[in-house]
Amino acid sequence: MQNQKKIWGSAIVFAVLVVCTLSFQNCAPSSSGSASSDNNNSNSTDSSGILSYPNSGTPVVLVPGQAVTLKLQKPSYMGSAADYIWMVPGDDYALASYYGLFTEINGYIYVSLTVKASYSSAKNMRLYILKMSDYSYADTTGLGIRVDSSAYGSHYSADMATEICDSRGSYVPTFIYDPSKSAADALIVFDNGAGVGSLECSFGGTSVDCLNTPAWPSDWASKKLTISGYNRCGTSTSRTF
């Protein structure tokens, strides 16, 4: 029951944030803003796979189909991670979820990213921290993320998923679905701290990968949708619209 209450609490946060943050999707913070300039210009990661944040150095390179949990140094301006969310504005539909909650463990913060297997472009983007108090960016630097299908074999591989599952394993993604929009925009996935694993969409009994919208049936908008999936810890979730 306690976990259920926590998940519903996250769902309420999501419902509020989806209204307040969609306008951020196509804009990044201005470098001339007044947000914190706590910055690190070195390479993005150390030998143990811990990423500095904020960081203007080498981006984290991911490939289509990859799911990874990043372990970040908690920035000095951050008190409780519960007062912030992470966001990747303008992700060009590359990610299963472009924003979500942090998991905080022993002074580190964790972010899980899942790249859609169907994404075929090369894209540079940045991950930022957003303050929930006023929905503004906490810093103007963020962390560089690059999705590149040509990077197989040299992509980022320090996956920290096992470190979050003890404390966040029961937290599953939350969904908002609007069939009046285009397929690319109809389903929004919010990460409640344990990442996004596989997601299967059943449109009136026709099952497809939720993250591969070109594979959706042509009449998807008129069908009942059931979403079945998992977080990165293997916990299942299901929702019908």
Image (cartoon, helix red, strand yellow):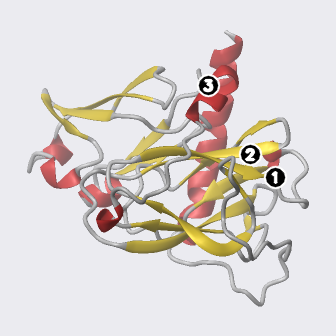
Amino acid type assigned to the residue bearing label 3 in the image: Cys
Quadrant position of the C terminus in the picture: top left
Quadrant position of the N terminus in the picture: top right
Residue denoted by label 3: 165
Neighbor class of circle 1 (other Cα within 10 Å; few <14, some 14-19, many 20+) is many
Measure the C-alpha gap from mark 1 to mark 2.
Answer: 6 Å
Measure the C-alpha gap from mark 2 to mark 3.
Answer: 13 Å
* Left or right position of 35 against 159: right
* Left or right position of 86 against 200: right
Q: Secondary structure at mark 2?
A: strand
Residue at image point 36% right, 56% down: 153
Name above or below for residue 89 compared with residue 49.
below
Q: Are marks 1 and 2 in contact (CB under 8 Å)?
A: yes
| Quarter residue 86 falls in | bottom right
Residue denoted by label 2: 109
Residue denoted by label 1: 74
| Quarter residue 3 falls in | top right
Neighbor class of circle 3 (other Cα within 10 Å; few <14, some 14-19, many 20+) is many
Amino acid type assigned to the residue bearing label 1 in the image: Lys
Amino acid type assigned to the residue bearing label 2 in the image: Ile
Q: Are marks 2 and 3 in contact (CB under 8 Å)?
A: no
Q: Nearer the viewer, residue 55 or 225?
A: 55
